Image (spheres, grey):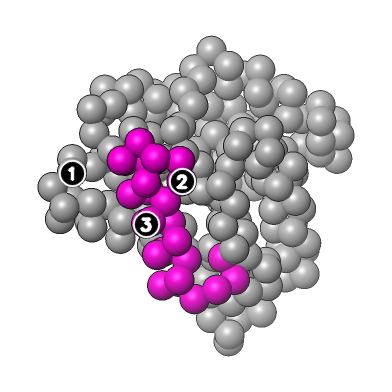
Amino acid sequence: MFIVFEGIDGTGKSTIARRLAKELEDEGFEVFLTQEPTKTWIGKDVRRAIEEEKNGYTQALLFFADRAEHVKEIERKKEKIVLCDRYVYSTFAYQGAQLEKETGIENALQWLERVYEPMRLDPDLVFLITVDPEKGIKRIYGREKKEKFERVEFLKRVQEIYMLIAERYHFDVIDGNRELEEIYEEIRKKVEKKIKGENP
């Protein structure tokens, strides 16, 4: 089983993925917890490209190089429950937002989808956790730090793109503006149903 957690910065998805992995392992399931960018040397190059603010095409292509190897690893773990913190949909949303000014969002998404197609591996379940960008940023940096207006506006657009593709890829959209415990319990129950073969 392959489960993905998506959302803008500050949704709590990483914390939820780690907690769920531990709980499932405690229940006796074999779990493979992973993330994108990966912790490989390619993943490190992805992070460097982001830090150096390389253009959207450069970032996207590095993400896909990292993902091409990552997909193979996920396929090797297919007998386990794979929990992935970010996947291709993050590239669609974040790099889509970067490329939008040059090509328009639909053209950007079409290009990103074409690059992804040869390595495509669809998850069994995708949780998109949404949150008000201002709230997400406060969760990350604390109330003492004021993030630049441009960052907030960028995350708003990223989340809009997430919602644009949510219906296309059948995401389970979760309201992340609530307490983390409440969000976690909702996701945990839906994962349990999926494991049992029920419709979450």
Q: Residue furthest front?
A: 198
Q: Residue 124, position in %: x, y? A: 44, 33
> What residue is at 62 percent from the left and 59 percent from the top?
130
Crowdedness of circle 3 by 10 Å Cα count: few (<14), some, many (20+)? some
Circles 1 and 3 in contact, beta carbons < 8 Å: no
User: How far separated are the C-alphas under marks 1 and 3?
Assistant: 14 Å
> What residue is at 71 percent from the left and 63 percent from the top?
151
User: How far separated are the C-alphas under marks 3 and 2?
Assistant: 10 Å
| Three-letter amino acid code at the position of disc 2 | Pro
Q: Is residue 133 visible?
A: yes
The residue tagged 3 is 188
The residue tagged 1 is 29
181 falls in the magenta region: yes
Residue 119 higher or lower than 164, as above or below: above
- Which quadrant of the structure image shows residue 102? top right
Q: Secondary structure at mark 2?
A: loop
Magenta stretch: give its range. Answer: 176-200
Q: Residue 131, position in %: x, y? A: 63, 65
Q: Which one is in front, 33 or 173?
A: 173
Residue 6 higher or lower than 123, as above or below: below
> What residue is at 58 percent from the left and 16 percent from the top?
117
User: Of label 1 and label 3, which has the lower sequence position?
Assistant: 1
Q: Which one is in front, 69 or 40?
A: 69
70 falls in the magenta region: no
Q: Residue 19, position in %: x, y? A: 30, 60
| Three-letter amino acid code at the position of disc 1 | Phe
User: How far separated are the C-alphas under marks 1 and 2?
Assistant: 19 Å
The residue tagged 2 is 200
